[in-house]
Image (cartoon, helix red, strand yellow):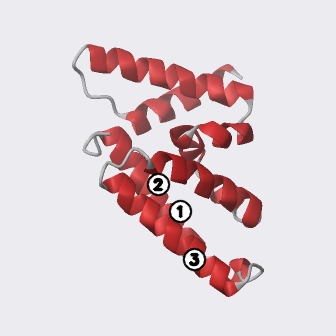
Amino acid sequence: MNTNLPYHRYHIALLMSLFDTLRAQSVLMAQVPEESNVLFLERFEEMVTQLQAGDQDALYAGQEIICQIITRYPQVAHMIPRDLLWYFGGDCLHYMPDEEIAQYQLLDEHQAQAEARGEEFDWEQARLLLMSEHLRNS
C-alpha cells in the first residue's frame, strides 16, 4: 500500500479526525466499561499507525474497528465518514445502501482510469463532484 498517494492520505486524515471525535466523546463512551474503552482507543490508534506505515493487514483491523464503533457506540456511529466504510470494505459495506455502493464503485473506476493515464486522482474532489451531481439528478 502506497501511503503517499492522496487517496490514502485523505482516508488516514479521516481516521485521525474520527479518533479525535471518539476521544472527545468520552462522556457518551462512558456507557462502556472504562478499561474496555481505553483498550479500544489504543487498538484504534495502533491501526492508524500501521496504516501510516503501509501495513496492508491494518485494513482488516480497520474493518473490525469501524464495525465495532457502529455496534459499541451507536450514538456516534453517524459521525463515521461514509468514505471510511468504503475504504475498509468487507463487513463495513453492510452499513451502506446499494445505491451508495454503486457511487463508490464509479469513483473507483474513475480513479483506475486516471491512474492508467498516469494522472493523479483527487479522491475527495471527485467524490464531492459525483455526490453533488447525484443530488442534482435526484
Residue of label 2: 14
Please tell me whether residue 81 is drawn above or below residue 120 in the rendered image.
Answer: below
Q: Earlier in the sequence, mark 3 or mark 1?
A: 1
The x, y position of residue 44, in whole percent, is 51, 65
Q: Are marks 1 and 2 in contact (CB under 8 Å)?
A: yes
Name the element at disc 2: helix
Kindly tell me whether residue 133 is visible in this rendering.
no
Q: Residues within 10 Å of mark 1 (few under 14, many from 20)?
A: some
Compared to 41, does 51 lie above or below? above
Query: Which quadrant is home to the N terminus?
Result: top left
Residue beneath label 3, please? 39
Counting residues from the start of the chain, the first of labels 3 and 2 encountered is: 2
- Residue 18: mark in rendering: 1
Mark 2 nearby-residue class (10 Å; few <14, some 14–19, many ≥20): some
Looking at the rendered structure, the kind of residue marked 1 is Leu
Amino acid under label 3? Leu
Gap in Å between the C-alphas at discs 3 and 1? 16 Å
Residue 110, horizontal then vertical, whole percent: 42, 19
Residue reaching furthest to the left: 118
Q: Amino acid at mark 2?
A: Leu
